[in-house]
Each structure stands twice: as structure tokens, then as C-alpha cells.
């Protein structure tokens, strides 16, 4: 039944289940009507092609812990654990602002990562 028919009949003629079903249908119809007016459908033929992402620049000799983790194929926390255990020796660069000792940048030499990989290969043989 539509909302107009609902208004014409008395409330006593409706069971709660019938009233609920009709109210749900009406709410659904109204929701679709509002969504159609608020969100225009994009035309896939008119959409421009996505811009190509530039290739990332190859990292230099010194890598951050995140770059070292990507190089090794592991997590950043494992790289930090290697540094804490002395497996990897970090390079400590001076801070950009004088007098700020906590701002030192810790970088890991790519050669140390290659030695770690080579040592791991030898240990497995």
C-alpha cells in the first residue's frame, strides 16, 4: 500500500506488521529519491585516465629504518631490534639544528644490509 492509501484507511484496519512493511517501503523509496538527487552518477566514458605515478627515486647509500626494512623485506621493528642487538650498526648523522642532540638521524648503510644478507646465506648452508 502507498502512503496515500494509508492515510485514507483507518489505523484500526492495519495490523502492526502491515503498517511496518508499508512504512519500510515508503522510507526506501524516499531514500532512493534523495540519493538520486544528491549524488550524480559519473560517466565512465568521460572519466580521465588516472595519472601515472612517477617511479620512486632509488635510495642512496644510507637508508632509514623504513627503507632498510623494505630492502630486507621485514618490519621496521625487526630492523630496530637488529640495531639494538648490534647486528646492524647505524650511522649517526649530526642534527640539522645545532644544540639538539635528540634530533640525530639514524641511518643504516646499504653495505651493512648486504653483509647481513650474505651472512644469513652462509649460515643456512
Image (tube, rainbow, N blue to C red):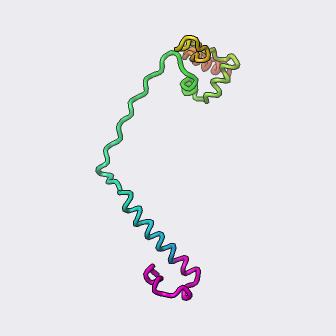
Residue extending farthest to the right is: 85
Q: Nearer the viewer, residue 37 or 53?
A: 37
Residue extending farthest to the left is: 46
Q: What x and y, as percent, mark residue 122?
A: 65, 18
Q: Residue at x 41, y 64 (%)?
A: 34
Q: Is residue 52 above or below residue 124?
A: below
Q: Is residue 35 above or below residue 62?
A: below
Which residues fall within the magenta stretch?
A: 1-21
Q: Is residue 29 left or right of residue 40?
A: right
Q: Is residue 3 above or below residue 12?
A: above
Q: Is residue 13 magenta?
A: yes
Q: What x and y, as percent, mark residue 40?
A: 35, 57
Q: Residue at x 63, y 24 (%)?
A: 79
Q: Is residue 4 left or right of residue 89?
A: left
Q: Residue at x 50, y 77 (%)?
A: 22
Q: What x and y, as percent, mark residue 25?
A: 48, 73
Q: Is residue 4 above or below residue 100?
A: below
Q: Is residue 34 magenta?
A: no
Q: Nearer the viewer, residue 89 or 23?
A: 23
Residue 91 shows in the view = no
Q: What x and y, as percent, mark residue 64?
A: 55, 21
Amino acid at each position: 500500500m502507498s502512503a496515500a492509501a494509508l492515510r485514507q484507511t483507518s489505523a484500526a484496519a492495519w495490523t502492526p506488521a502491515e503498517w511496518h512493511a508499508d512504512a519500510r517501503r515508503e522510507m526506501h523509496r524516499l531514500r532512493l529519491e534523495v540519493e538520486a538527487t544528491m549524488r550524480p552518477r559519473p560517466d565512465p566514458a568521460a572519466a580521465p585516465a588516472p595519472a601515472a605515478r612517477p617511479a620512486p627515486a632509488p635510495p642512496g647509500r644510507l637508508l632509514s629504518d623504513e627503507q632498510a626494512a623494505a630492502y630486507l623485506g621485514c618490519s621496521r621493528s625487526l630492523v630496530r631490534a637488529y640495531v639494538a642487538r648490534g647486528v646492524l650498526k647505524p650511522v649517526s648523522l649530526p642534527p640539522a639544528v645545532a644544540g639538539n642532540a635528540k634530533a640525530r638521524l639514524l641511518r643504516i648503510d646499504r653495505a651493512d644490509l648486504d653483509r647481513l644478507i650474505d651472512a644469513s646465506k652462509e649460515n643456512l648452508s
